[in-house]
């Protein structure tokens, strides 16, 4: 059974989040004055009347409103427990009304509220808890240890509230699972680690924690935040607490680029939830109510007498991440998990719009991502526990541990009589660079020996080792993530691997299929790497060899219902956007002497083409944009998604890193043709695969010219359905 973790596993939502959230702002008053509270205009004495609540319930249960099967009744303030009698009456009326309407909501509901805990032990609150115990989610905010809590959560006279709240938290722990919500602002960051640990030690096993979204952050706050999280991670791992507690500051899904699907989503539920205040005004979220706004008018979408004006909700349907974010956010390679509040965005926008995203927590999010990468790397290295739901290993820093490194790319490394090895200090600085820049370290080992010895410091990183298969007996036990490289001089007969690189010299293409088919008997996936790829490459021989390999894959699939993968044949079946070597865009290379290069091809063939070093960073990386797909002029409209597009080959053959040679294009289109034939034979269909044309081009320049002609005739149009 696979090992599991709870710290970093996220929080499961009731009904997987598929329920209607209805928020009642039952009061604008509060018996505390928390310094970080976003409700900046509290109003003592302003509470909701029962008549307003009744009208709202009657409206949401009317035939005008579409209702999913489940509902969450959320009661907020101010401090909601100040109005516990009103909440009790609202719940009674809601259940009876839903029952009379024949709605599933009369039984398929949850009551949710977060309280400051001051009144939790009152008789009326305890009676309510007893009455709705099976349907109630209630949590008290205990903000960490006493020093941290009393720094922020104070009474109107400035006294700290910890002692009152702690007493009532102890009562709650006898009734419910221990859970709380903790908020961190600038002044209390130094208490983060100790606060989380104290909460756990007090029986509060589930800690939902976040930093405030507002513009409160000072210089170096991100560094304090990161160091506190790293220190907390070390405590968790040293005491093996990773499967005993929960803290949402660690989350296995954060720190990836946005996917196309995510870009079409919104950051929160504003517009999907409904909130009503004491005046009967209806909001897309309570953050659009005037008591939490400083710069713009409240955004009202209706009232209890006239219902919802759905025209006012239309902006929230379109307020996707893609349309709220600027280029920096859209292109951020660690964007996921960087949450934002639509209501705060609206209030902070230069004009009253929902389409301008503030970025106050940018540095704090990146600090959190680094600390999460640290935690999950050590979790893997120390306990062998894999991080789930995470795919962001596409940004790589290749460490050439010697100048006699094993080939892993189409440009031959050659042989060096005078061998240089990367020393420990350069490795350490390279790992620091990778960590700071969210890159996965890849150690490319020497062809003939494994010289590196494991340092305890390396446990902080998830390192991929590219190693000759012939050296497998030399591999230290600490190496956990290994990609073997095979070539004509070594064989595999005695063990099963999940994945490997198979180097094939371009002059030895004939009978390539024999080697590939033999290796496929022992691995799930073979990455064919054609070394010394040149213009005189035997393309027809290569095509025939791929056909034989494809036939073997199809035969094995029919026999076992399991697809053996060969990168140049099967990858294009499963991807729906262009994927090349990514050198200069999503990967760079570190030489044994500590210099950065675009890739190992430039290092071995253009040693003076240095783009930086471990001391100064990428201080000589000019025209970086040319390495991105946006500048790949002949590839932007290409229908080959998996491509051997090699930037060094581009540079060598065409003089431009972003323009591929004709024989590279020809090779890639041959691979696509064989892959499409296999796809058709196996009837493998993926919904996300683009429905592109299957016309084959000898050179992609033909496609570009054809598209340009169509454009001139006005045939290509951008059609938007409104």
Image (cartoon, rainbow, N blue to C red):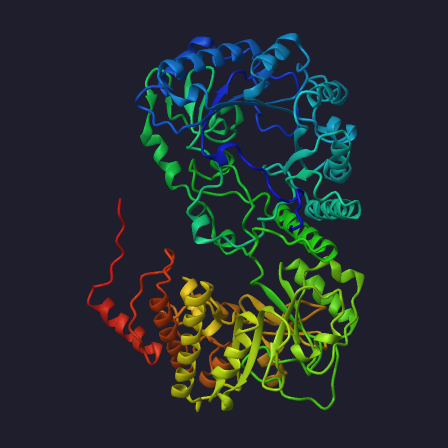
Q: State the image coordinates of residue 280 (x, y, percent, origin top left).
A: 42, 16
Is 559 above or below relative to 236?
Answer: below
Q: Is residue 463 visible?
A: yes
Decide if residue 473 is on the left or right side of residue 100: right
Q: State the image coordinates of residue 658 (x, y, percent, origin top left).
A: 45, 75
In depth, the one of 560 and 115 nearer the eye is: 560
How many marks the image carries: the answer is 0
In depth, the one of 183 and 223 nearer the eye is: 183
In depth, the one of 666 and 507 nearer the eye is: 507
Q: Is residue 634 visible?
A: no
Residue extending furthest toward the left: 713
Residue at the location (39% across, 79% down)? 547
Is 268 above or below relative to 260?
Answer: above
Residue at the location (30% across, 21% down)? 63
Q: State the image coordinates of residue 124 (x, y, percent, origin top left).
A: 62, 8
Q: State the image coordinates of residue 139 (x, y, percent, origin top left).
A: 63, 25
In depth, the one of 355 and 661 nearer the eye is: 661
Is 59 above or below relative to 716?
Answer: above
Decide if residue 716 is on the left or right side of residue 492: left
Residue extending furthest toward the front: 559
Image quadrant for the C terminus? top left
Is 136 above or below relative to 346?
Answer: above
């Amino acid at each position: 059974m696979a090992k599991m973790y709870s710290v970093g596993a996220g929080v499961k939502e009731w009904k997987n989040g598929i329920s209607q959230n209805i928020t009642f702002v039952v009061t604008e008053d509060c018996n505390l004055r928390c310094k970080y509270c976003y409700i900046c205009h509290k109003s003592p004495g302003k509470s909701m009347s029962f008549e307003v609540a009744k009208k709202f319930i009657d409206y949401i249960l009317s035939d005008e409103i579409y209702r999913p099967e489940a509902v969450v009744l959320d009661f907020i303030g101010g401090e909601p427990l100040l109005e516990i009698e009103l909440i009790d009456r609202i719940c009674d009326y809601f259940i009876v009304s839903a029952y009379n309407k024949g709605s599933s909501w009369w039984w398929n509901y949850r009551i949710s509220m977060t309280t400051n805990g001051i009144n939790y032990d009152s008789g009326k609150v305890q009676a309510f808890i007893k009455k709705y115990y099976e349907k109630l989610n209630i949590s008290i905010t205990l903000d960490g240890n006493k020093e941290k809590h009393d720094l922020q959560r104070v009474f109107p006279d400035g006294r700290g509230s910890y002692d009152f709240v702690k007493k009532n938290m102890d009562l709650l722990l006898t009734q419910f699972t221990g859970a709380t919500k903790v908020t961190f602002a600038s002044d209390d960051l130094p208490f983060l680690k100790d606060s989380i640990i104290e909460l756990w030690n007090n029986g509060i096993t589930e800690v939902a924690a976040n930093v405030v979204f507002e513009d409160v952050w000072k210089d170096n706050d991100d560094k304090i935040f990161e160091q506190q999280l790293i220190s907390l991670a070390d405590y968790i791992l040293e005491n093996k607490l990773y499967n005993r507690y929960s803290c949402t500051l660690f989350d296995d899904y954060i720190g990836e680029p946005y996917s196309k699907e995510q870009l079409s989503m919104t950051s929160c539920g504003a517009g999907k939830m409904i909130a009503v205040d004491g005046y009967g005004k209806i909001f897309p979220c309570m953050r659009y109510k005037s008591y939490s706004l400083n710069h713009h008018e409240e955004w009202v979408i209706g009232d209890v007498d006239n219902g919802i004006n759905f025209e006012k909700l239309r902006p929230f349907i379109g307020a996707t991440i893609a349309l709220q974010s600027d280029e920096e956010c859209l292109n951020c390679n660690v964007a996921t998990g960087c949450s934002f509040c639509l209501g705060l965005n609206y209030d902070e926008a230069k004009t009253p719009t929902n389409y301008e995203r503030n970025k106050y927590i940018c540095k704090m999010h990146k600090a959190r991502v680094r600390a999460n990468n640290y935690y999950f790397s050590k979790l893997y290295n120390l306990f062998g526990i894999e991080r789930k739901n995470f795919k962001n290993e596409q940004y790589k820093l290749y460490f050439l541990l010697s100048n006699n490194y094993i080939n892993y790319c189409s440009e031959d490394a050659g042989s060096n009589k005078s061998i240089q090895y990367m020393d420990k200090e350069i490795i350490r600085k390279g790992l620091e660079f990778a960590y700071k820049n969210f890159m996965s370290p890849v150690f490319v080992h020497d062809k003939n020996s494994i010289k590196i010895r494991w340092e305890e410091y390396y446990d902080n990183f998830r390192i991929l080792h590219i190693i000759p298969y012939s050296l497998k007996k030399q591999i230290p036990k600490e190496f956990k993530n290994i990609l073997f490289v095979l070539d004509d001089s070594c064989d595999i007969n005695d063990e099963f691997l999940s994945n490997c690189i198979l180097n094939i010299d371009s002059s030895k293409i004939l009978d390539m299929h024999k080697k590939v088919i033999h290796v496929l008997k022992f691995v799930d996936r073979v990455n064919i790497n054609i070394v010394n790829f040149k213009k005189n490459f035997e393309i027809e021989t290569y095509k025939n060899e791929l056909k034989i390999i494809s036939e073997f894959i199809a035969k094995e699939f029919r026999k076992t219902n399991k697809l053996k993968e060969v990168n140049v044949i099967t990858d294009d079946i499963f991807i729906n956007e262009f994927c090349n070597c990514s050198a200069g865009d999503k990967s760079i290379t570190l030489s044994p002497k500590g210099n950065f290069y675009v890739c190992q091809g430039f290092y071995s063939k253009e040693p003076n083409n240095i783009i930086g070093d471990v001391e100064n960073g990428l201080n000589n990386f000019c025209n970086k944009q040319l390495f991105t797909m946006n500048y790949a002029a002949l590839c932007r409209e290409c229908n080959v998604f998996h491509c051997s597009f090699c930037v060094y080959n581009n540079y060598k053959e065409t003089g431009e890193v972003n323009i591929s040679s004709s024989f590279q294009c020809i090779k890639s289109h041959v691979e696509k043709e064989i892959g499409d034939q296999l796809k058709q034979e196996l009837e493998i269909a993926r919904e996300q695969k683009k429905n592109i044309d299957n016309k084959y081009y000898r050179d992609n320049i033909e496609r570009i010219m054809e598209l340009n002609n169509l454009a001139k005739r006005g045939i290509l149009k951008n059609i938007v359905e409104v």
